[in-house]
Amino acid sequence: MGKARFRLDLRDERLWRDEVPVQITNKTFQILRFFVQSPNCLITKDTILDNVWPGIHVSEGLIKGYVHDLRLALGDDPKRPTYIETVRGRCYRYLGGIAWESRSIASRAGPPRVAVLPWQYFGGTDRLRLFGRGFSAELTNLLRQEP
């Protein structure tokens, strides 16, 4: 039996092991997301705190617990790491090996679509009514153009 292949789906916020979803908590997912977007970089505990818990004071021990849960989900051995290395007393390093995709719904379904509704006229001068019509027409024409 070969090594499992992990895939992180950023759009649906799911971790997959081969074709089976792996159950992890939201914060565990957020830490993994941060790791995979920074491969082979030293990631300090303060950096994790700032990016996963912005503006909230939590203990560094909480990070250790979530990284432990993440290693369990990945089957990663901290003594011989495949995915997450601990740089003792300082930080972590994500070693790579997890595929990730960040395609948005729009990229899967084609170009984005925008509806421009007609300008409503609720009184005022004829000049404002004409401005509203012209603005609506100009906006529609600009949005129709290819990028």
Image: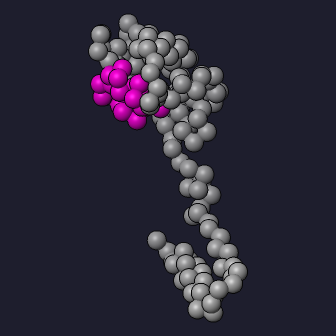
Q: Is residue 26 magenta?
A: no
* Left or right relative to 51: residue 18: right
Does residue 101 sit above or below 15 in this rendering? below
Most distant residue in the top direction:
79
Q: Which residue is more in the foreground, 48 or 9?
A: 48
Q: Quadrant of the N terminus?
A: top right
Q: Residue at x 61, y 39 (%)?
A: 12
Q: Which residue is more in the foreground, 109 or 127?
A: 127
All told, the count of numbered labels is 0
Most distant residue in the front direction:
124
Q: Residue at x 60, y 51 (%)?
A: 105
- Stretch in magenta: 33-51
Q: Which residue is more in the foreground, 125 or 4?
A: 125
Q: Is residue 43 magenta?
A: yes
Q: Residue at x 53, y 23 (%)?
A: 28
Which of the 4 image quarters holds residue 77? Answer: top left
Q: How is the image coloured?
A: one colour
Q: Is residue 71 visible?
A: no
Which of the 4 image quarters holds residue 133? Answer: bottom right
Which of the 4 image quarters holds residue 123? Answer: bottom right
Task: Name the spot of residue 11 as percent of width and height, x first.
Answer: 57, 42
Q: Residue at x 43, y 14 (%)?
A: 59
Q: Is residue 123 visible?
A: yes
Task: Name the spot of residue 121 as percent of width and height, x first.
Answer: 69, 82
Does residue 117 sit above or below 7 in this rendering? below
Does residue 145 sit above or below 83 in this rendering? below
